[in-house]
Amino acid sequence: MSMSGGRERLVVIGGDAAGMSAASQARRLRGPDELEIVAFERGHFSSYSACGIPYWVGGDVAERDQLIARSPAEHRARDIDLRMRTEVTEIDVAGKRVRARAVDSGAESWTSYDKLVIGTGAHPIRPDMPGADAPGVHGVQTLDDGQALLDTLARTGGRRAVVVGAGYIGVEMAEALINRGYEVTVVNRGSEPMSTLDPDMGRLVHKAMEGLGITMVNDTEVTEVRTGADGRVRAVATEDAEYPADVVILGIGVRPETRLAEAAGLPLGARGGLLTDLAMRVRGHEDIWAGGDCVEVLNLVSGQEQYVPLGTHANKHGQVIGTNVGGGYATFPGVVGTAVSKVCDLEIARTGLREKDALRVGLRFEAVTIESTSRAGYYPGASTMTVKMLAERRTGRLLGVQIVGREGAGKRVDIAAVALTANMTVEQMTALDLGYAPPFSPVWDPVLVAARKAATKVREGH
Amino acid sequence: MSMSGGRERLVVIGGDAAGMSAASQARRLRGPDELEIVAFERGHFSSYSACGIPYWVGGDVAERDQLIARSPAEHRARDIDLRMRTEVTEIDVAGKRVRARAVDSGAESWTSYDKLVIGTGAHPIRPDMPGADAPGVHGVQTLDDGQALLDTLARTGGRRAVVVGAGYIGVEMAEALINRGYEVTVVNRGSEPMSTLDPDMGRLVHKAMEGLGITMVNDTEVTEVRTGADGRVRAVATEDAEYPADVVILGIGVRPETRLAEAAGLPLGARGGLLTDLAMRVRGHEDIWAGGDCVEVLNLVSGQEQYVPLGTHANKHGQVIGTNVGGGYATFPGVVGTAVSKVCDLEIARTGLREKDALRVGLRFEAVTIESTSRAGYYPGASTMTVKMLAERRTGRLLGVQIVGREGAGKRVDIAAVALTANMTVEQMTALDLGYAPPFSPVWDPVLVAARKAATKVREGH
C-alpha cells in the first residue's frame, strides 16, 4: 500500500480510547508487514475507562486495573509499538513527522509518519482562582488523578467534601463521596444541576440529590479555595459564604486537548475541537485523522457541530478511523446527544436538543412533560419517572427527550435516540411497538405517553 | 353528527382493553349529548390487566383489584353505559343491531347501533383430551380464571404443579408457582421453550429454567389429564410418561374470539382474527371497527398479517378506534413483533422475524449471535446477555433481534423495535448514539456489538 513499496507507518498520538481503538482496528485489517504502528502516550496507562473513575473512587470498583481494557503489554503483543510516558510536543504537517519527548528522561526525537491519528483527548477546566492547586484539590480526569484522590482520602481523616460543578462528573463524584461516608456539598454555577437538561428537569435532580443528603448550592461561583496552616485545603469560598472542605473535587468539565493541533495549523471549531469529515479525517488533510475527546462532532438534530466528550463516541471514532486507515471504508455520521448518568438510585438521561439548543438553531417546538412508572403500576418496584419531550412545531419531528427517574428510567432514552436518528415524528412514535410486560413497563410505555401528549400538542398547535 | 339529527349510538362488544379504550377515547372527543355509548361485557370485570394475572397468582401483586385499571362504576361515571354480565349473542349487520343476553337471568334484547366496536378478545386453546376439564386444571386467561386458580391453590395442600405449554403464559406461570413453593414441571410440545424465539435462543431459556429448579420436558405432547378417586387431577400423562400433579395450568396459547363476527359474515384472516384497515375499521364495513385480541395485525417486517394478542396493542387499537369513532383521525400502522417476558431474574425479549418467519416470506438473511454484558464489565451487577440479530442479505436491513439475559436485557429490545420501524440497516445501527455510562452499558452496547457483527457478515456475504 505504501508509495515507496515498503511498509507504511501509522503514528498515533494518545493511547486511550480513540487512538488505541484506531490502532487495533488498523492492525486487524493490515498486518505488521504492511503497516507499522507507533503510538505515543504521555501517561502511565493505556485504553482505560475514564468514565469508571467515579465508581472506583466510590468503592463500587475494587481495583484500578479493572478499568484498563487493554494494557500496554497487550497492545505490544499485537505489534503496536506503544511508547508510554512519551509526550508528542510538535506535529510537523509539512514534514509528515512528530516530535516526542520521553517524560522521565526528557530525551526528544522525531518520528515520521505516512498516516497520523490524533487522539489527544481533553483536559479538565481548572478554575483560575487562588488555591486551585492546593493539596486536597483534585480533578478526576485520568487514572493518575483517581489514584491521587484515593491517596488523599486514605491519608486524611476528613469527612467533608465539596464538589465544584454539577454536570456528569460532579454528580457522579457526589455519589462516590456519599458512598464513602462523606458529607457532600455541591457548588454549582448554574441555576440547577445537570445543565445538559432543561432547568425544569434539572430541578428534579436537585430535589433528589437533596433527598440523598447532599447539600446543593446553585447559582453560585466558587471564588477561592482556602488553605490551612498546613497548606492543605480547608474550605471553598464563594462570594458570600464559605464551605468547610477536607477534600475538593473539580468537576467543571473538560476542553478539547488541541494545543498541538492548533500549533500545527489544523482546523479547529468554535469549541476548540478538531474538525473532521465524516470519515474522521481532519478537514483539508489527506493523511491526518482525529477522534475522541479532541474533536467536535456533528449533531444530527441541530445540524451543527458540538463538543461531546464521551468514551462511547471515542470508541466509535477509533473504529471508523482504524477501518479507513486500514484500507476499508467507514463513517461516523454524527451524534444525537445521548447521555445517561446516575446518582445513587436516581437515573438521569437526555438525548437531542434542550429548549435553548432548539431556539439557538431556529427551531420552534412544543414541549410536554409527563409522569409515568417504570413498570405496571401494580407490579412491585414500579417507580415514578418524568419524561420531557420536545417536538418541532408543524412537522412534529422529535427534537429531544429528557428522563429523570429510578430503575429502568435511564436506558429508555435509547428509544428516543433511535427515533431521532430516524427523523421520526412524535405522531409516528405513538405507534411504536415497544416491549410490554408488567415487570418491564406500563401498557403504555412512558416514552409513548410523552409522544401521545406531544403529538396532540403539535396537532393543536399554531 | 347523526343522520337523523339526534345523537348517535356507539355499541361496544367487550369491556376490556380494546373496547373500553375505544369507548373512553370516543367519550373524550364527543359528549353524551352527541354520542350514546353502550358497552357489553359478559364477565365480572372491566378494563383489567390479563397480563398481570401470573404476578397476582405468584404473589407479587397482592390484590385482584390492583389489576383493574377502571371499574364498571368508573366507566359509568363517565357516561358509558357498561352492562356487565351481559353477553352479545348475535350481530345483525344488515339491521345494525346486536342481541344481548343477561348471563344470570337469561333475558335477551336487541340494541341498535350507528357504530359498532368489536373487542371480543381471545379464548384459550383447550386441548381436546380426557380430563382437560377436571377440577384442578386451570386456564389463566381472565380474572375469574385467576381467582379460581388461587382458590384451588389455597384449598388443596399439593406441592406439585404441571404447566402445559412453554410460551409467555407458560413460563410466567412457572415462575408464579416456583414463587409459591411448588415443584414445577413444564411440558412443552416444541423442541425448546419460547417458540417465539429461534430454538438456539430458546435453549438458553431452557437451561436457565432448569437452573431455577424447573423440570423442563420438551418435544412432548400431553395426551391426558388423569384424575384420582375424588375426580380431581392427579397427574398429566404423555405418550410415554406420567407427571404427578396437584394442579395443572394450561398455557398453550389463545385464539381470537371471533365466533360472533364469523356468524355475522365479517372478514376473518388465516389465523381466525378479524381483518381491519389501517384505521381499525373492519374491511368492507363502514360502521364497524375491531381491535385487541380478536384481530390480526400487519407485521411491518414481513408485510403479512399476524396474530399477536397483547394488551399493549389492544390499548393502541382502542385509542385509534375511539379517535376515529369520535370524529378524529388516527391509524394503527402495524407491529414489528416485539415481546418481552421474564422467568424469575431471566429476561427474554424478541422483535421482528425469527429465522423461519424470514424464510417463509422469502427473505434471505445473515444471522449472528453475540455475548456481552448489561453494564461495563467492571461495574457491580454486570451480567451476561446473548443477542441474536438477523439482517437481510445484500441490503443489510434489520430483520429481527432476540435477547436472553438478566437485569437490563429485556427492554434493550426496544432499540431494535424502533430501528425495525424505521427500516434501518445494521450498518446504520452501528453508529447509533445509545446511552452509555458504566452502570448502564458497556462502552459498546450489546445491541451495537451485534449490529457490528451483522454488518460485517452482510458486507462479506454473497
Image: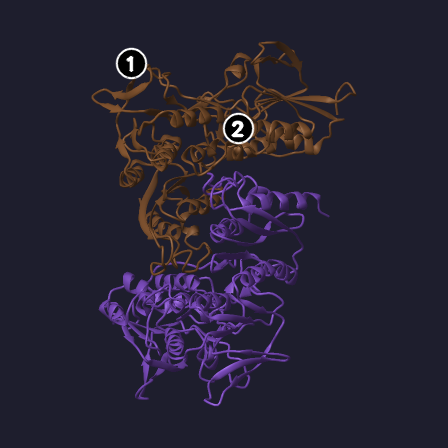
Chain colours: A purple, B brown
Q: Is label 2 or label 1 in front?
A: 1
Circle 1 Cα neighbour tier, 10 Å, few/some/many (<14 / 14–19 / ≥20): few
For the residue pair A205 and B257, the one nearer the viewer reads as A205
Q: Position of residue A277 (x, y in %)?
A: 47, 65
For the residues beneath circles 2 and 1, the answer to whether they share a chain is: yes
Circle 2 Cα neighbour tier, 10 Å, few/some/many (<14 / 14–19 / ≥20): many
Figure check: B172 above or below A339: above
Which label is found at residue B429?
A: none
Question: Disc 1 designates what residue?
Answer: B229
Figure check: B350 above or below B268: below
Residue sitting at 40 percent across and 76 percent down?
A153
Task: Write down the quadrant of residue B74 in the picture.
Answer: top right
Q: Look at the image and tell me in which quarter the C terminus of chain B lies.
A: top left
Q: Position of residue A387 (x, y in %)?
A: 57, 51
Tell me the subunit letter for badge 2: B
Q: Earlier in the sequence, mark 2 or mark 1?
A: 1
Q: Look at the image and tell me in which quarter the N terminus of chain B lies.
A: top right
Which label is found at residue B292?
A: 2
Tell me the subunit letter for badge 1: B
Q: Is residue B423 left or right of residue A216?
A: left
Badge 2 marks a residue whose secondary structure is loop
Task: Write down the quadrant of residue B306 in the picture.
Answer: top left
The reply to whether the C-beta atoms of the residues labelled 2 and 1 are less than 8 Å apart is no
For the residue pair A191 and A284, the one nearer the viewer reads as A191
